[in-house]
């Protein structure tokens, strides 16, 4: 079997990541590449990557999901409130994750069953999830009592092989997702939906089931991401993760379309995109750059990633049919 070779364009984001490390190492000196800072970059990248793992497949299937930051917020608030009420930590985790599944099922019901536009639907679901998150503690951050004693906090405080546990968990889950994406029929159907859904339907594939799975998985991973941020960063429930997470999440996913499968969002690219954003944030912070400067750069990166996906899909999608997020 002939091995596939990769073009320079397909490896461009890897080059961007390497160049970024070189530039920030020169500008910031050893402070940037010392182990403490690198571990923080890995920790930040792992957390964001987990939150948007499901979003990668939603966009890969030609749909859109704007609800993931608020679903994460809602899950974080449910998790924090239940822990403060002294419920069993495992039950708190399960219920919080189930909240994500419920939002995913609501989205899929409206999109798959009633044929609502996924962009409009997920904006509505985002509004509901955000409202629930704010209702739980009247819009305030909810500090958690006794979080340090829970098995989840202790688990994510470990550093196997010297790496943050959240980064290791992200590596494992992304490796499993890669196997599903590349080695199963589900992965084939996933990308076929964005290119020619009619052909997929005529071949007997239950495309509604595939789309339901990606919406539910996206919301589940968003909820999981929200809990991860509670355990590793905030130590509290957050009623709003909207602004920065929204931009960062989409930037990770669309930048990932510049890796391996050019123009297609996929899990390897999303993981590298998360590393790029984490390194960028760290480097800019050390340079004393303001929040607005980082947002401008991330916005430009998002435009670049969307441009790659748009150009690719205009070449592959049959003429006269719009992309679902247009």
Image (cartoon, grey):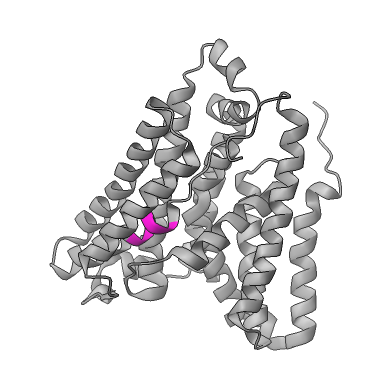
In the rendered structure, the answer to whether residue 19 lies left or right of residue 171 reads: right
Residue 79 seen by the camera: no
What residue lies at 50% left-to-right and 69% top-to-bottom?
164
Seen in the picture, residue 31 relative to 66 is either above or below; the reply is below
Quadrant of the rendered image containing residue 143: bottom left
The reply to whether the magenta stretch includes residue 70 is: yes
Judge by depth and name the residue closer to the eye, 287 or 116.
116
Seen in the picture, residue 70 relative to 163 is either above or below; the reply is above
What residue lies at 36% left-to-right and 69% top-to-bottom?
231
The reply to whether the magenta stretch includes residue 285 is: no
What residue lies at 46% left-to-right and 43% top-to-bottom?
120
Judge by depth and name the residue closer to the eye, 164 or 222.
222
- Quarter of the image for the N terminus: give it: top right
In the rendered structure, the answer to whether residue 169 lies left or right of residue 88 reads: right
In the rendered structure, the answer to whether residue 13 lies left or right of residue 241 reads: right
What are the residue bounds of the magenta stretch? 69-73
| Main secondary structure of the magenta stretch | helix
**Image spot of residue 53 (x, y percent):** 51, 49
The number of discs equals: 0
Judge by depth and name the residue closer to the eye, 271 or 164.
271
Residue 83 seen by the camera: yes
């Amino acid at each position: 079997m002939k091995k596939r070779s990769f073009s320079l364009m397909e490896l461009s984001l890897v080059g961007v990541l390497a160049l970024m490390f070189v530039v920030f190492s020169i500008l910031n000196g050893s402070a940037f590449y010392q182990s403490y800072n690198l571990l923080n970059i890995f920790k930040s990248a792992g957390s964001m990557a987990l939150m948007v793992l499901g979003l990668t497949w939603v966009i890969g299937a030609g749909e859109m999901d704007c609800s993931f930051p608020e679903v994460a917020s809602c899950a974080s608030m449910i998790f924090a409130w239940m822990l403060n009420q002294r419920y069993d930590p495992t039950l708190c985790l399960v219920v919080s994750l189930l909240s994500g599944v419920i939002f995913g099922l609501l989205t899929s019901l409206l999109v798959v069953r009633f044929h609502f536009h996924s962009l409009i639907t997920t904006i509505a679901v985002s509004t509901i999830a955000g409202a629930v998150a704010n209702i739980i503690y009247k819009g305030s951050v909810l500090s958690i009592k006794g979080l340090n004693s829970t098995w989840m906090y202790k688990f994510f405080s470990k550093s196997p092989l010297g790496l943050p546990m959240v980064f290791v968990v992200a590596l494992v889950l992304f490796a499993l997702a890669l196997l599903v994406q590349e080695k199963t029929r589900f992965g084939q159907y996933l990308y076929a939906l964005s290119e020619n859904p009619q052909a997929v339907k005529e071949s007997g594939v239950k495309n509604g089931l595939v789309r339901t799975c990606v919406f539910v998985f996206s919301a589940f991973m968003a909820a999981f991401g929200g809990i991860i941020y509670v355990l590793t960063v905030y130590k509290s429930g957050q009623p709003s993760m909207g602004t920065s997470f929204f931009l960062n999440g989409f930037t990770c996913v669309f930048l990932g379309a510049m890796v391996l499968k050019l123009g297609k969002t996929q899990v390897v690219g999303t993981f590298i995109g998360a590393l790029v954003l984490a390194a960028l944030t760290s480097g800019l912070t050390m340079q004393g750059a303001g929040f607005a400067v980082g947002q401008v750069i991330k916005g430009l990166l998002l435009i670049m990633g969307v441009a790659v996906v748009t150009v690719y899909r205009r070449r592959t999608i049959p003429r006269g049919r719009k992309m679902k997020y247009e």
